[in-house]
Amino acid sequence: MAAIVLIGAQWGDEGKGKATDLLGGSINWVVRYQGGNNAGHTVVLPSGETFALHLIPSGILTPGVQNVIGNGVVVDPGVLLTELGGLEDRDVDTTGLLISADAHLLMPYHVAIDKVTERFLGNKKIGTTGRGIGPCYQDKIARVGVRVADVLDEKILTQKVEAALELKNQILVKIYNRRALDPAQVVDEVLGQAEGFKHRIADTRLLLNQALERGETVLLEGSQGTLLDVDHGTYPYVTSSNPTAGGAAVGAGIGPNKITTVLGILKAYTTRVGSGPFPTELFDEWGAYLAKTGGEVGVTTGRARRCGWFDAVIARYATRVNGITDYFLTKLDVLSSIDTIPICVAYEVDGERIEDMPMTQTGFHHAKPIYEEMPGWWEDISQCKTFEELPQNAQNYILRLEELSGAHISCIGVGPGRDQTIVRRAIA
Ligand code: GDP
Ligand code: IMO
Ligand code: MG
């Protein structure tokens, strides 16, 4: 009986898609447990084919793996059908994908409200992906959401959409000067879309628990990252769900005691998309160098990612709040050919050195990185297969990150491909 949670240890885009794909061959189930199509997970198959997944678990690319969109996810039905269609057009077998009856449906009014709210916030905006994620989770928590199972009962669906739009239309029209949405039209559209996914609706928490009882392995694929968590991240510059490991039990409907491994995905440097504090952010030529060499452009929105050096304060924090047992360090290859590589080991906050995350957001906004420098390496490491094959300085860099982060670095990414991974300790 084993459930593995795979989470982003920074601000997202650490390489969760690649890590999920790598583990695909040794697991039975892959489950998305939170977020929605704000995620963009890239998988590069051994054939060189590249896929970008938003709502569908990255396990869909491994034949034989059963994939689940869990109850904690918010599902935009239009995006779901487009993504399924895109995969099927490329001959990916999607028959195994199931959707929790309890997942919430992301409706057109959620997207509309996300966009107008951001515009209204002006320079205080969160920099959301504009996919309606926050407004959909707001409705879930306010108990006025529409769930996937509601498409099976037209009367209930109509009642819920009408009730939701009664208030939302007032907000859209009177506050934001936008057009009202017609409830009947919204219901018709959703019912039409439901024809394309109805057969996938299932009691996924029952199926996952039965699978665990049978001794099968379940991988819970997180989206976003620890610092984007609504409780543990850099609030309010966060997403509206719990990407951290604790969220996996809730978002999939399994007991936390089923989780045996928490795999943190950690980039060898740091990136962030959208607004919010980022202590190691670089505004000089090194920021531009990391962005260019690492190809740091958002998979979902095409926005440029902000870049900075590795931040060990954040990594230590991620280890702690997620209970990380193993790290997958990605994109080490991007750091080849740099003379000396700075690592942020602590912060200076208002004249004081601190080793851990400041207690307050004000403290985090004031945090200035304290760097230690490590000698770099010039060799091309993209074909290295073992830890020992890496240049000594690259090995030293990994060992220092491991020491500072407080968890074992078990896998090392040396390129985007599935095979470009060094496995020091097997995960599954
Ligand atoms: P995710 O959201 O965590 O799945 O990450 P993204 O897919 O948004 O961004 C990670 C990017 O880095 C993708 O373009 C991956 O193909 C790429 N990538 C992942 N691991 C490595 C690695 O070890 N080296 C290099 N060069 N690229 C990687
Ligand atoms: P993956 O799974 C990076 C960021 C947005 C914004 C904030 C809130 O690919 O790592 P939202 O639309 O969720 O309300 O936006 O969160 N964000 C991500 N940043 N990777 C992601 O997903 C993200 N999903 C949301 O840029 O700052
Ligand atoms: Mg991404």
Image (cartoon, rainbow, N blue to C red):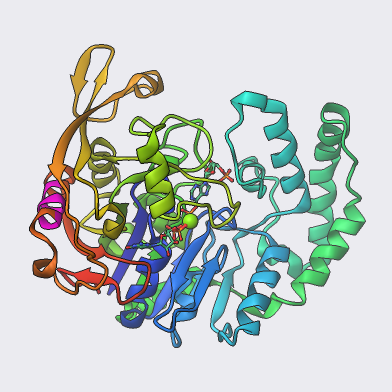
> What residue is rendered at 45% in x and 55% in y?
295
Residue 67, percent from left and from top: 49, 75
Is any part of residue 175 visible from this angle?
A: yes
**Which secondary structure class fits the magenta region best?**
helix
In this rendering, is residue 188 above or below 400? below
Residue 315, percent from left and from top: 26, 43
Residue 399 within the magenta-colored segment of the rendering: yes
Q: Quadrant of the C terminus?
A: bottom left
Q: Which residues are magenta?
A: 394-400
Residue 174 within the magenta-colored segment of the rendering: no
Taking the image as shown, residue 82 lies to the left or right of residue 16, namely right
On the image, which quarter does residue 127 sit in?
top right
Residue 375 or 421: which is nearer the viewer?
A: 375
Q: How many marks?
A: 0
Residue 70 or 134: which is nearer the viewer?
A: 134
Residue 285 or 152: which is nearer the viewer?
A: 285
